[in-house]
Image (spheres, rainbow, N blue to C red):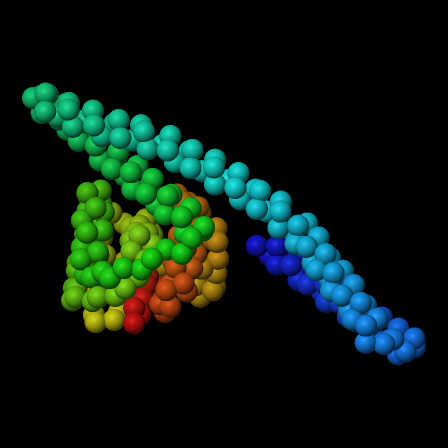
Amino acid sequence: MIERDKELLLALIIYIITITVLLMAVYKFSDNWNLNEFNFFIAGAVVFVVVVGWGYILFSLLFAPKKKMEETLTTLTNDIIHELNIPLSTISANVSMLQKSIEDEKSHKRLQRIEDASKRLKKLYDELVYTIHKEMYQVPKEPLDVKKVVEERVSIFKEQKRNLFELNLVSCKIEVDKIGFEQMLDNILSNAMKYSEKNTPIYISLSADKLCIKDSGIGMNEVELLHVYERYFQSDINNEGKGIGLALVKRYCDDEGFQIHISSEKNVGTEVCLTLN
């Protein structure tokens, strides 16, 4: 993105310099040669053609390769997404049929684990489609009740049987990009679980315009807090992950106009608060 901005800025500077030089040349010639109105009109038309032609050349050099690459990536992405959806649908359909025909309890539990895994894969598939769509088009906003979304996401994390959740929620209705909101919430919740001991509580509170998620995990010091939104930064390198969760959270909050505040203390815990108005 930065390289593209530099290229556009350089092209704009070259284009402005070209127009300026041509206009100065026309002015110089008209002043020295005492051109009449007709000849001045001809000179102006020539300058206009040169400016348009030069602009077209610059545009082609800069944007034609990018447009071709985007078209190729779009085709490739659509093919991959389509191929991913087929095995997911096959797994889900066959698990449903096997659950109806098998009576053994142990086999049912195994099938349930397969079904749960396929649901998580489907969620990842939906998020992949959403992310690609968001990069190409404007994602429509829709009304949602934050309380309901938090309860739904927490119920999914509870299936991991790892941490306890203590909820203090009131209804809070906003209009946002729903899938993005769920992704953001999942990132915060997964971080709270990842950096906390098993069975320690995670506190979630929701007021009329504020959502807070607090854990009793390893926490961060002041230096780590300064870098917490940087992509690939991890306060604890021993934990699994790529260090992009909070970077995505911050990006989403900026896009939606939410304020995010993180307070943390080493070996005490971390609290993430979002102002949703």
Q: Position of residue 99 (x, y in %)?
A: 12, 26
What quarter of the picture does the N terminus occupy? bottom right
As drawn, is 70 to the left or to the right of 6?
Answer: left
Q: Position of residue 212 (x, y in %)?
A: 27, 65
The outermost residue toward the right is 32
Q: Is residue 236 visible?
A: no
Q: Is residue 268 above or below residue 198?
A: below
Q: Is residue 72 visible?
A: yes
As drawn, is 52 to the left or to the right of 166?
Answer: right
The residue positioned 48% from the left and 54% from the top of the image is 231
As drawn, is 261 to the left or to the right of 31?
Answer: left
Q: Position of residue 165 (x, y in %)?
A: 19, 54
Front in this rendered view, residue 200 or 263? 263
The residue positioned 36% from the left and 47% from the top of the image is 130
The outermost residue toward the front is 38
Q: Position of residue 179 (x, y in %)?
A: 31, 52
Residue 116 lies in quadrant: top left
Front in this rendered view, residue 173 or 42? 42
Q: Is residue 258 above or below residue 127?
A: below
Residue 272 lies in quadrant: bottom left
Front in this rendered view, residue 267 or 155? 155
The residue positioned 40% from the left and 48% from the top of the image is 133
Q: Is residue 151 above or below residue 90?
A: below
What quarter of the picture does the C terminus occupy? bottom left
The residue positioned 40% from the left and 63% from the top of the image is 255
Front in this rendered view, residue 50 or 2? 50
Count of numbered labels shown in the rendering: 0
Residue 37 lies in quadrant: bottom right
Q: Is residue 254 above or below residue 124?
A: below
